[in-house]
Image: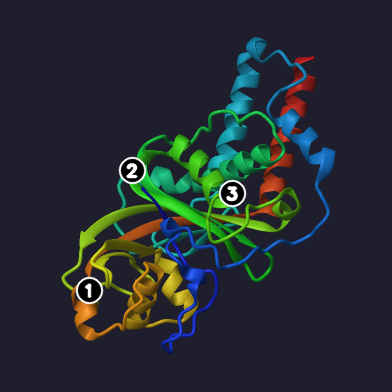
Amino acid sequence: MSSSCCGTKKQKLNGNYSSANGYSTTGTNNAGPQRNGIADAGGAAQNNHNNYHGRGGGAAGQQSQQQQHQHQQHQQQLSSSSSSSSSSSSGYNGYMVNGHGNHHLSQQQSSMIGSMPDMCFYCFEVLYRELHNLEEPRTPCFTNDPFPLFVTWKIGKDKRLRGCIGTFSAMRLHSGLREYAITSALRDSRFSPITRDEIQRLTVSVSILQGFEEARGYLDWTLGIHGIRIEFYNERGSKRTATYLPQVATEQGWDQTQTIDSLLRKGGYRAQITPETRRSIKLTRYTSQECQMSYSEYRELLEKQSHYHGQLCKMQC
């Protein structure tokens, strides 16, 4: 089941809760459209996409061993040119990578973290091609292991939320990121669909979730370290769930109780929230590995790849 991850704006936790944080499956759309008119990237960007994906010729099947070796070296530089620490906030080739609460990573996790900028790049590729009615991007090179995941789109210098949807079911990363890059951009019920005119102002964040643990109580988690998912019964006796990723509470400036109350409201709880209400919650905590990339960073990387493939084509000719 898909879930939305975070609020649309800072809430004032004084008893008056904004419905803009409505749980995504209720179909509420009170956040209102957030459209930003900017110049279209136009044909130049599309031409770069065509070059990058090899349309228009080239004898890839006739590469010499030396050219293949050069290509492999270039791909390694694109994917692994920096050895950032995975257990704390750090830059990875200039893209922000954050690890929440994982100081002992397996080889699989370390490999995954090193590939996260490629995952952000892939999300931009998927969305760009969807908005411009182009064919899907080629199969990415990063791991296709299954993980729970979220894709978040933000817009502008102040990085206002523009869409955030993911799943707690482990999905193969290739299909999962492809699905949720589009779903979070075009089908988050809190927002109007992202348009072509907005893409130049976007930042994408990929969150890979792990380390799920059932908490001993509603306060058995750490701000800035854990994401939380709550299960509860609303005033009509219906079971509901809601989640916040690890960064949400600290970005909003909330303490633990404020975060729980906001999450209850997000999940559709409308009655008065009492200490007994909070104690009745079943809370699961988790950690995440996150990476973010702006559109300008995506374009820079795309142009580097296009330039390299152009040079390779000239060598072949």
Label 3 packing within 10 angstroms: few (<14), some (14-19), many (20+):
some
Mark 3 or mark 1, which is nearer the start of the sequence?
3
Residue at the extreme top: 62
Position of residue 276 measured from the top left corner of the image (x, y, whole percent): 19, 82
Disc marking residue 220 = 1
Position of residue 286 measured from the top left corner of the image (x, y, whole percent): 30, 60
Residue plotted at (39% across, 60% down): 87
Residue at the extreme left: 216
Label 1 packing within 10 angstroms: few (<14), some (14-19), many (20+):
some
Q: Which residue is mark 3?
A: 186
Q: Nearer the viewer, residue 269 or 254?
A: 269
Position of residue 20 measured from the top left corner of the image (x, y, whole percent): 52, 70
Q: Nearer the viewer, mark 1 or mark 3?
A: 3
Residue plotted at (74% across, 41% down): 303
**Left or right for 168, reference 46:** left
Residue 281, placed above or below residue 297: below
Amino acid of disc 2: Ala
**Left or right for 115, reference 204:** left
Amino acid of disc 1: Asp
Amino acid of disc 3: Leu
